[in-house]
Structure formats: C-alpha cells, structure tokens
Image (cartoon, helix red, strand yellow):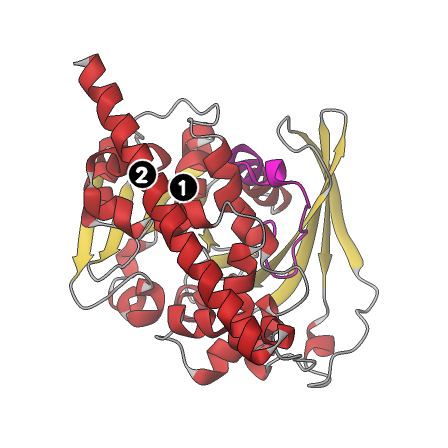
Amino acid sequence: MASASLARRFISTTLLLCIGLFRAALLGIFIGAQVLFKGRRVLQPKERSEEPECLRDPELGSHEFVTLERTDLWLRLSRKVIPQHWLLMSLRPAPLPSLSILRMEKIQVRAVAKDVTLHYVSAGSRDKPLVLLLHGFPDFWFSWKYQILDLKKDFWVVVPDLRGYGQSSKPASVDDYQVSKLVEDVHGLVKSLGRQKVTVIGHDWGAPIAWSFATKHEDMVKKLIIINGPHPVAMQRQLHNSLEQIFKSWYIVAFQLPCVAEAFLSVNDMQALDELHAVYSDEEREAFKYTFGKPGALTGPINYYRASFQRLSSGGFKFRRLAVPVLIVWGRRDTALTEGVAVLNLDYATGGRVEYMSDAGHWVQRERPGYWTAKPSLAAR
C-alpha cells in the first residue's frame, strides 16, 4: 500500500514537472517572438502615473498601515493611517503625507524574521465584529470591493494587501514568502487591531493562509469562509490523485523559472491580466494594471509559488480537523482548481459544508457580487 502511494506520488510529480516545463517552453517561445517582432519595449507595461479614481473611493474605507518590527522574539506593532482628506485631494499622485502613529504595542512572535509593513483598508464600525478578507493571485485588496460595501454595514471589515502585494512590503528573498511567515503577518495584523476573535474569508492564495492561520490560532477564529481556494494538504492530495488538476496546475512549475512568469504577465501591457480578470470592468482592470505594472510588483506574488514549491511539506503546521464553523463557497467553472479540492477541503473541517455556484468560476466574489447581500448569515456574528 505504501509503495503504491509512493509510486503514485512519483508519477504525478513527474507528470506535473513535464507538463509544466513543456508549457514554460511554449511561454518562452511566445515571449521571444513578441520581443523579436515588437522589441523589448513589449515587456514594459504602459506607465500609469495617475492612480485610478476607484482606488480612492471613500465608500471603501480608510487606508492604513501596520509595521511588524522584529526585535529578538518581540514584535512591535506600529499602526498608521492615511488621512481621508488626503485621499480625496487630487487625482494626481502626491508625496505621501506624514503618517500619524495611532498606537504601538508588543506581542511575542517567532516566525517573522524581518520588518514587514502591511497596507490594509478598514471599513465599517470598529465596535462591530471583525471580518478579515484575504485575497489571492493576482489580486490585491481591491478585489474585495463588493464584499467591503456589503459587509461593512454589519461588520468591521479589514482587507490587507498581503506581503509582496500592492502597498505592503515586498521582501526580496523567496524564503520570506513561506506560509508560516504569511500566517504570522495575519496574526500580527489581528493583534494590532486589538481583537481576540475574527471571521476570516480567504480566496485563492488567501485560502491556504486562512486554513493555516486557523490551524495555528484556532482560538482566535470565529468562522472560516473559503472561496475557491485549497487547504494546503488537500491541494497536495489532489495533485497526486487527479490528472485534471495536474493539467490545470502546470503554471506552478512554469513560475519556478526566473523571469518567465514576470515577462509573461507583463508582455503586451499586461495582456494576461486582462484575460485573467475578464470578469472585471475596464476601470477595475486599469486599477490592477496600475498596481501590478510598477517595477518589481509581480515578483512578490509569484514568489508565493516559488516558496511553496521549494517546501512541499506541511510547513511545520500540524493540520487537523478544525472545530470552528467552515463554509466553502465554490464556483464550478474554475479553470485553476477542480471540484475535488473543495471536497477534500472538508476533511479538515468538523462542521464544514460546501455551497456550489454553477454559474461562477474562480472569482466568485466578482462574478456573484450580490451573493453576500443575499446570504448575510455567511459572515459569522
């Protein structure tokens, strides 16, 4: 039995590598052809000096920062806020104003190796239950636009740019994107907000971070909601047992090659982002290009895949069946994840259930923006 399992793992891993490297070669040929016929400028996204107005919408909340400063085993939390009036002053970028420190406190954290500053959007009353929204790839806080508007009526909604994304810190080392460090970013953020309980909603990459956070800090989680995203172990299991998932996951291997993913996502003014975000409006897609078109903005997000590929283990987490309520929302038209991942996710939730959406794909939160209004019970109270 054990030998059969090992053989299956070997075959599936080899197949994933072969398919991934073949597709990576095709990407290389495509990129090379674009450069040959259009010149190297084709790899440079159009300069976007003006921030899209939709990113400064005051209805989406205030923009704040928390700095996680490592001093031995102590983590100092510095919370800063950009005044709302500055955000509304002008459509033209201006020098960042002096940020006032709202509060500083210390908690003990072992996994954060370097100082990290997280940018996040805060909406709703701070007296209400806290809901934390964790985005995926290639997204940033703005991908939760509709959920912010819906949930802020009943909750304090906090939406960070994860490490490496948007206005948050972008460490250079691949090792700085290990899930254990991403989890402690989330832990530090929640602590800085002065809360002991939080409902966590994670999409895509936000899902394994949410699962891992709930595993390590289950006492802090009121409810866990997963949107088209895998449990870390469920994803590994599906890759070893599903040929369909192997074919869908080829990009994980391609992303390991230096510069290939960055070049592919940048070519032709980030055409790949347009295709990935086809469900978004033109204005929304411009917001994504403004964010990811900045120099070096793509490497951090891609490093999530590089870090996970280098360490194909549990990352030090002792995964188990969680006792907290777990809801999995799954768009059945997902082109990156098979439904088998959703089913396997349930193995790690004692009281979990899946709600399928036949008319939605990977980005349920954008394809079905009214879902949260119609289902107010989804966010734990």
Front residue of 240 and 281: 240
Q: Which residue is mark 2?
A: 235
Q: Amino acid at mark 1?
A: Pro
Q: CA distance from mark 1 to mark 2?
A: 9 Å
Measured as percent of width and height from the top left, residue 362 is found at 31, 60
Compared with residue 352, is residue 80 higher up or lower down, i.e. above or below?
A: below
**Residue at point 35% right, 70% down?**
366
**Residue at point 33% right, 48% down?**
249
- What's the magenta region? 162-184
Quadrant for residue 37, please give it. bottom right
Q: Tell me: 20 left or right of 161.
A: left
Q: Is residue 353 visible?
A: no
Front residue of 301 and 82: 301
Front residue of 226 and 21: 21
| Mark 1 vs mark 2: in front | 2
Compared with residue 365, is residue 65 higher up or lower down, i.e. above or below?
A: above
Q: Which residue is mark 1?
A: 208
Q: If the image is split into quadrants, where does the N terminus sit? A: top left
Measured as percent of width and height from the top left, residue 54 is found at 54, 80
The number of numbered discs placed on residues in the rendered structure image is 2
Q: Amino acid at mark 2?
A: Met
Q: Is residue 274 visible?
A: yes
Quadrant for residue 36, please give it. bottom right
Q: Are marks 1 and 2 in contact (CB under 8 Å)?
A: yes
**Residue at point 32% right, 41% down?**
16
